[in-house]
């Protein structure tokens, strides 16, 4: 099983610290932000201890592609109301892709965007426009569009939305999907019947496009459109369903990342990974 969690990247050890954190959870995958998710300040890549981190991954037989990045929340490609927000989104996404490429990261998870006070149709087409401005034919990084809960004016809460974006983007070969269990549950997908969801995903998008999953329980009922993550087994999705999902034979090669909340300031990931791997 390829499984890990979100890991911090804090000063001094940077990516080396992130990999060490992942190893402390017995993980063989991890997700990081290449800098603070709420702002655009970024350390130069040469300061991030990339070589040391890469070597530590190799020593532990962990492929480099199991370390993935998440783009900052400030990137909103769907904003067609505020030109400067859209401009910031495209220029910053371009820089994030370059940063990932420099570090050697293959996957960058991206929230498709929120249309704010415009309309869904305008928003989703703005996302396509933005991706067409940013993606380059020969880039090495794959952007993973994340399935969203549909809170506020989010685009991407149905598989069809992601399919539409992919179909209309010129360099669609650089797009794939990150499926978040909390988000799809909150969007109204019934995870008690996960095989139907997988079949739908395969029919609409194609299972070969599913590269990463975020494994989270949900604090809210199915369809609540809230997006509040719960610890594994503590929410409305439940341990049995999440265990079934991470152990699904069709998802063996999909990278699974926990984004569950800390418990009394402690990361729950070591215990949650063990629980998900256990035989039941
Ligand atoms: Fe996300
Ligand atoms: Fe997520
Ligand atoms: Zn979320």
Image: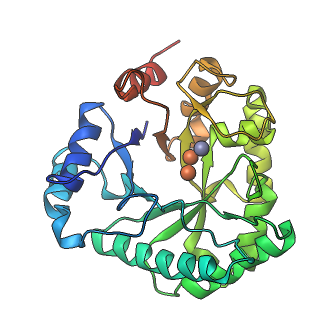
Answer above or below: position of 46 versus 50: below
* Quadrant of residue 226 within the rendered picture: top right
Between 203 and 149, which is closer to the camera in this rendering?
149
The picture places residue 119, in percent across and down from the top left corner, at: 86, 69
Q: Indicate left or right for 63 with 249 as reference.
A: left
Q: Position of residue 150 (x, y in %)?
A: 76, 49
Is residue 128 left or right of 216 when viewed as pictured?
A: right
Residue 194 in sight from this viewpoint = yes
Vertical arrangement, residue 205 with respect to residue 279, above or below:
below
Q: Is residue 80 left or right of residue 265?
A: right
Residue at the image position 69 percent from the left and 74 percent from the top:
127
Q: Position of residue 7 (x, y in %)?
A: 34, 44
Colouring scheme applied when the structure was drawn: rainbow
The percent position of residue 19, horizontal first and vertical second, equals 24, 46
Q: Nearer the viewer, residue 158 or 81?
A: 81
Picture quarter containing residue 246?
Answer: top right
Counting every numbered tag in the picture gives 0
Q: Residue furthest top?
A: 280
What residue is rendered at 43% in x and 36% in y?
A: 1
Residue under the point 64% across and 81% down: 130
Q: Which residue is more in the foreground, 185 or 224?
A: 224
Q: Quadrant of ligand 3?
A: top right
Q: For residue 61, say whether it is visible.
A: no
Residue at left offset 74%, top offset 52%: 202
């Amino acid at each position: 099983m390829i499984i890990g969690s979100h890991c911090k990247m804090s000063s001094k050890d940077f990516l080396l610290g992130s990999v060490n954190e992942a190893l402390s959870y017995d993980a063989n995958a991890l997700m990081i932000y290449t800098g603070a998710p709420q702002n655009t300040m970024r350390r130069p890549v040469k300061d991030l201890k990339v070589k040391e981190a890469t070597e530590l991954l190799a020593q532990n037989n962990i492929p480099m592609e199991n370390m993935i990045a998440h783009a900052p929340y400030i990137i909103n490609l769907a904003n067609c109301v505020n030109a400067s927000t859209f401009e910031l989104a495209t220029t910053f996404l371009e820089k994030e892709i370059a940063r990932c490429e420099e570090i050697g990261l293959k996957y960058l998870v991206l929230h498709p965007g929120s249309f704010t006070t415009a309309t869904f149709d305008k928003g989703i087409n703005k996302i396509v426009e933005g991706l067409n401005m940013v993606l380059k034919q020969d880039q090495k990084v794959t952007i993973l569009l994340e399935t969203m809960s549909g809170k506020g004016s989010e685009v991407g809460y149905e598989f069809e939305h992601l399919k539409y974006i992919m179909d209309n983007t010129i360099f669609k070969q650089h797009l794939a999907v990150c499926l978040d269990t909390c988000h799809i549950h909150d969007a109204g997908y019934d995870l008690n019947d996960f095989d139907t969801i997988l079949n739908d995903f395969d029919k609409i998008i194609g299972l070969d496009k599913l590269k990463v999953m975020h494994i989270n329980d949900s604090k809210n009922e199915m369809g609540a459109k809230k997006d509040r993550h719960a610890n594994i087994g503590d929410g409305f999705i439940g341990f049995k369903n999440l265990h079934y999902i991470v152990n699904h034979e069709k998802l063996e090669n999909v990278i699974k990342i926990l984004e569950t909340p800390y418990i009394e300031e402690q990361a729950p990931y070591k215990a949650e990974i063990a629980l998900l791997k256990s035989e039941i």
